[in-house]
Amino acid sequence: MLRRPMLQAGLAGLALTLLLLSQAMASDSARYLAVIDAGSSGSRLHLYERSAAEGSVKVRQLFEDKSGEALSSFERTPDEAGPRGLRPLVDRLIARLDALKIERSAVHLHLLATAGMRRLEADHPAASQTIYQSARSALTSSGLAVRSIETLSGHLEGIYAWVDVNDLNGALAATPSQGTVGIIEVGGASAQLVYAMPGPTGTSATAVKLNGRSHQVVSMSWLGLGQDQARRAMIGLARSQAVGNEERCYPDNRGASGGLTAFDADGANLLIARGRFSFEQCSQLYEAVVRPFGLPALGPIAGEAPRPMLGLASVFFALSDWQALAHPASLRETLRRECEGEEAYGNKVTRFIRRDPRHRFAQTACANGTFVHTLLYGKAGLRLAPEQVSAASRVNDTPLSWTRGFALVSD
């Protein structure tokens, strides 16, 4: 359960949202929760069974489907968001419920969109309103107990992800097995930074209560600082400076490895010529993109133990691609070694990360790795020390998802 003091007028809307959410959940507790994570790159549905005994809350996933289309992708055809984007997910959920012999009416369904819809609501409010009308129509006809249909704030998305990680590693148990870790979660359109403070912090933290204990949690979110949005901003900035400058974030591929004659920078035909990667120049571009967001410096403080930070989503994928999970400090030199030089793409990059040279995630791997390095260690980034950083996609053999955190604290 979440509580946040309403001591500043600017926080009134958020505090009211948290209060109403906790009141609604407390008055209508559910054993089964289905949560649709409508993200910027797709919609994923999770079915959870929630139980509480002897002051301890447990959540078990019963079903998952990752095949839904992103709600924000229906900007031009908003009436189709429900029938095409959500109804196929719900139909597969219902088939699973029938197999498990769970009544539809026993399942509380929540549709919670993230950064893609945050951006669409800001840029095209009429389209986003129609998308939600279409979504509600598709969901209410399902026979499930529909609850939330809304855009989740980045603040809450970060908190739920933090709860998920720290519950899985035992830090939120009634008798914790270790201290909490902070998280750096980077999606396609936004980034979240969340960590616990050792004591009360006034208005800067949210109280997260679970298993009879309370934690003061700082959660920050930056729309536009997701990996894909940052890359598009980098390209726009580079092109404004000089023709072809964006090629500094892409490796040389004059030999057209795999038949690739230009890099598809975002999977939507934003094409970059064959590349001339420079780690220093690419880093400078990303520093300029990151700087306006005003990220806090979280590096070690003299006399204090360094705060451990766990990278999620795009942070994990970048460190994994560049074989830096065990040694995050190696990311810079690996990018220089593998991405710079003649014919680097075909001769080094795709062999190192073991991906088809035509695969769009391979095409942007050098740019994405440089962005993550800038975000973690750069002068405009979080300025972490490598020993503070680790990354994961699973904890205790469980895939990470903020939806699980939502299920844990939703009562």
Image (tube, grey):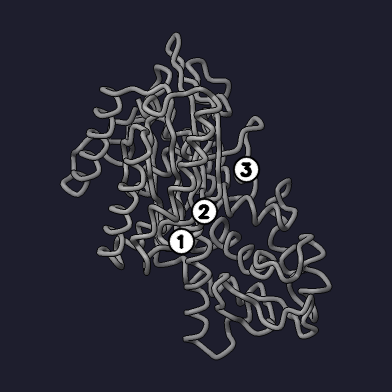
Asked whether 208 or 389 is in front, the reply is: 208
Instruction: Using the rendered view, name the quadrant where residue 255 is placed.
Output: bottom right
Q: Nearer the viewer, residue 68 or 290?
A: 68
- Amino acid residing under circle 1: Leu
Q: Quadrant of the N terminus?
A: top left
Q: Specify the quadrant of the image occupied by residue 391.
A: top right
For the residues labelled 2 and 1, say whether their Cβ atoms are less than 8 Å apart: yes
Graded by Cα atoms within 10 Å as few (under 14), some (14 to 19) or many (20 or more), the crowding at tag 2 reads many
Q: Is residue 182 visible?
A: no
Indicate the position of residue 90 as horizontal and vertical percent values.
45, 42
Between disc 3 and disc 1, whose residue precedes? 1
- Could you tell me if residue 40 is visible in this image? yes
Separation of residues labelled 3 and 1 (CA atoms): 20 Å
Residue that lies at the very extreme toward the left in this rendered image: 9
Farthest bottom residue in view: 243
Q: SS at mark 3?
A: loop
Where disc 1 sits, the SS reads loop
Q: Nearer the viewer, residue 21 or 202?
A: 21
Quadrant housing residue 194:
top left
Q: Are marks 3 and 1 in contact (CB under 8 Å)?
A: no
Q: Which residue is mark 3?
A: 393
Residue at 48% of width from left, 79% of height from top? 236
Point out which mark residue 186 bears.
2
Instruction: Where is residue 192? Give x, y as percent.
Output: 45, 50
Residue 342, placed above or below residue 233: below
Residue drawn at the location 25% of the way across and 64% of the way down: 126
Q: Which residue is mark 1?
A: 225
- Coordinates of residue 16 in the picture (x, y in percent): 20, 39
User: Residue at 65% of width from left, 57% of height from top?
Assistant: 318
